[in-house]
Amino acid sequence: MGDATRRVSCVLPAYNEGECLAFTVTEWAAALARHTGDYEIIVVDDGSTDDTASRLRELRTRHERLRVITHDTNLGYGTAITNGFAAATFPLLFFTDADGQYAPDDLGRLLEHVDMAEVVVGYRLGRSDPGIRHLLSRGYNFLVRRALGVRLRDINCAFKLMHRDVFRKLEIESTGFTINAELALNARVADMRVIEVPVRHRPRLAGRSKVRPVHVLSGLHGLAQLRGRRRRSTASGRSPTGSGAFRGGASLPLERNRDTAARAG
C-alpha cells in the first residue's frame, strides 16, 4: 500500500460503460493500492441500459473494496458524483470517469498537493478526443471563464480530489455536466485554494462518449443559472476580488509540467 495517511474514496460515475468497467476498475484498484493507505471504489450506475449492472456484480466478486450504487433511472452525471461522495467513507474524495481515459497513477500527482489546498484538479495534457469534442471543450472553457469569472485551464477535466469537509461546504446542486463549473464557482466564492496539476488523457477503450448535443444546450442553461447565482453572491458581498482568480490558487509552473509529462511517457 502507499502512504498510510491517504485514505481515498474513488467515485466512478457510469452510464452504459459495461465494455470498459472490467479494465477500469481493475486498473484503478491497482493504482489506489500503490498510492493510498486504504481506499474504496464506488461505481455509481446511473440508470444504465446495457450490461453495466451484470458486469459490476461480477467485478464485486473479485474486488472487495468495490461498492456499487444503482440509480433506477438516469439522474445525471452531477447526481451520480454527489451521491457517490455522500456514500463515501474516507476523508479524501476523488472522482473520475469510468471510460478509462485517465491514467490512474496520475492520482499520485494530486495527492502530493492535497495538504496545500482544499481542492486539487487535473488539466489534460494532449487531450485524446475527436476534434469536435476538443473544439467544444475550448468554447465551453471560454464561456465559463467569461460567465463565472473562474480561471481553471480545463473546467470539465474529470480528475478532481478534495477533502470530505470541502465537499460539504461546496453545496453542489448541479445534476448534470455543469457540476464541474459549479464546483469551480463555489470554490471561488468560498475563497478556497485550488491547485491545478497536469494529467494524461488517453483514447477511449471502448464504447462511445455519452455527451450529446442536448448536453451542450443543458450545459449552457446551467451556466446561465450559475451566472445568476454568481451575481447574487457578488451583490451580497460573498464573492472575492473581481479579478476572477482563485485567491491563493495555483497551477504547476509550465516548465515543471513539461518535465512531468516527459517522465510519464
Image: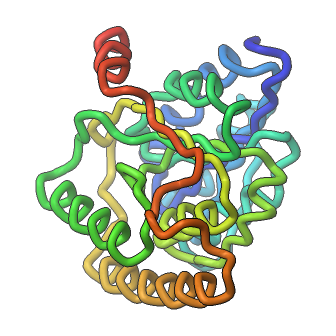
Quarter of the figure with residue 26: top right
State the residue in front, 249 or 227.
249
Q: What count of labels does the image hold?
A: 0
Residue 61 at least partly seen: yes
Q: In this image, 199 relative to 180: left or right?
A: left
Q: In this image, 57 relative to 147: left or right?
A: right
Q: In this image, 148 relative to 186: left or right?
A: left
Task: Pinpoint residue 231: horizontal percent, then vertical percent.
Answer: 53, 87
State the residue in front, 3 or 211.
3
> Which residue does the image show at 63% across and 60% down from the upper left?
187
Task: Pinpoint residue 27: horizontal percent, then vertical percent.
Answer: 54, 26
> In the rendered image of this protein, does residue 89 appear above or below residue 179?
above
Task: Pinpoint residue 25: horizontal percent, then vertical percent.
Answer: 58, 35
> Which residue does the image show at 67% across and 71% down from the upper left?
172
> Which residue does the image show at 71% across and 47% down from the upper left?
42
Task: Pinpoint residue 60: horizontal percent, then vertical percent.
Answer: 73, 39
Quarter of the figure with residue 70: bottom right
Quarter of the figure with residue 94: top right
Q: As drawn, which residue projects farthest toward the right?
A: 89
Q: In this image, 264 relative to 8: left or right?
A: left
Residue 57 at least partly seen: no
> Which residue does the image show at 35% across and 9% down from the upper left?
263
State the residue in front, 86 or 70.
86
Q: Quadrant of the C terminus?
A: top left
State the residue in front, 77 or 121.
121
Q: Quadrant of the N terminus?
A: top right
> In the rendered image of this protein, does residue 2 appear above or below residue 195?
above
The colouring scheme, among rainbow, by chain, secondary structure or one colour, is rainbow
> In the rendered image of this protein, does residue 155 appear above or below residue 35?
below
